[in-house]
Image (cartoon, grey):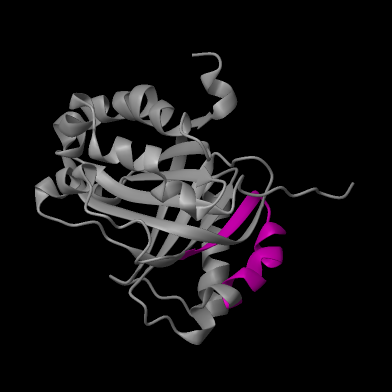
Amino acid sequence: LEIIFMSLLGDAVLVNWGGIVKVKELEYNEWHSKEHMPERISLPGFLRGLRAVGISGTDINHKYFMMYEAERKEVFVSKKYLERLNNPTDWTKDILSNYLSPSRTICSVISSKSIGVGGYISTIRFLGNEILKNQNVEYLKTATSIILKLNGITGMHVLIGDSSFGQMNTQEKKIRSSQGLDDQIVSQAVIIEGLNLQSLKSAINHLKKIYLLKESKNLIINYYFCQNILTKKDLLHI
């Protein structure tokens, strides 16, 4: 039986990493699932939202990974979306003012293959624009077929960030910097999905060997498990 791989739902994604002040963490999860994701996914062009939480031991500044899939990049600068960004609800204002180390980038999907959404997720973030040739997205995506053959791996996505797109100084952006840090922007990213943590770690080790990847302040690797996913069809039942 030949495996039929699908992909992310659109041509662009908004990826977010960050943490939340400990006393606000439970409320953050409630807010993100019951207000924020439904609000975003209801907008034209938004297709699916996801939130994942870091495995035990994850640095609090990188504890959460969020991703919104959209039809195209322009969705993230649409009039209706910007209206939301500049008119946050009181609950949004409260939660975002307790956000730690925000990272937010609009990315183009360069390569994407997956079987649904894996329960475990690993992300590789490349910061700065000085990407070595063997770590360029065009080279990284050539490993997709190798990684997908590994036991327990269900998907791999390669993204390239746009440091100038959708970086308007909106009200939400101002509030997110309340803890003293501006949004961090990734130049490119790799997302790997799988059935278990060990499979993800094996896949990451493969990539490290192939592309000589070394973790640093400009190359951040994290492991997460999926908490919540929301699509437009789900909103019909709310």
Q: Quadrant of residue 92?
A: top left
- Picture layout, residue 117 above or below residue 223: above
Residue lying furthest front: 79
182 above or below 233? Answer: below
Nearest the viewer among 161 and 77 is 77
Image point 81% across, 49% down: which residue?
A: 3
Left-right relation of 119 to 166? right
Horizontal side of residue 3 vs 188, given as left or right = right
Magenta-drawn stretch contains 57: no
Determine the residue located farthest toward the bottom in the rendered image.
Answer: 133
Above or below: residue 148 compared with residue 216: above
The residue shown at (33%, 50%) is 17
Q: Between residue 141 and residue 162, name the one nearer to us.
A: 162
Residue 199 x %, y %: 58, 53
Q: Nearer the viewer, residue 42 or 204?
A: 42
Q: Residue furthest right?
A: 1
- Towards the viewer: 149 or 69: 69
Q: Position of residue 185 (x, y in %)?
A: 32, 63
Q: Position of residue 114 (x, y in %)?
A: 66, 49
Query: What's the residue at 17%, 33% (across, down)?
Result: 93
Residue 148 relative to residue 55: left or right: right
Magenta span includes 144: yes
Tell which residue pokes out farthest to the top in this image: 237
Q: Please provide the residue range marked out in magenta.
A: 139-160
Give the number of marks: 0
Q: Residue at x 80, y 48 (%)?
A: 4
Image position, residue 144 (x, y; %): 66, 64
Q: Is residue 190 left or right of residue 129?
A: right
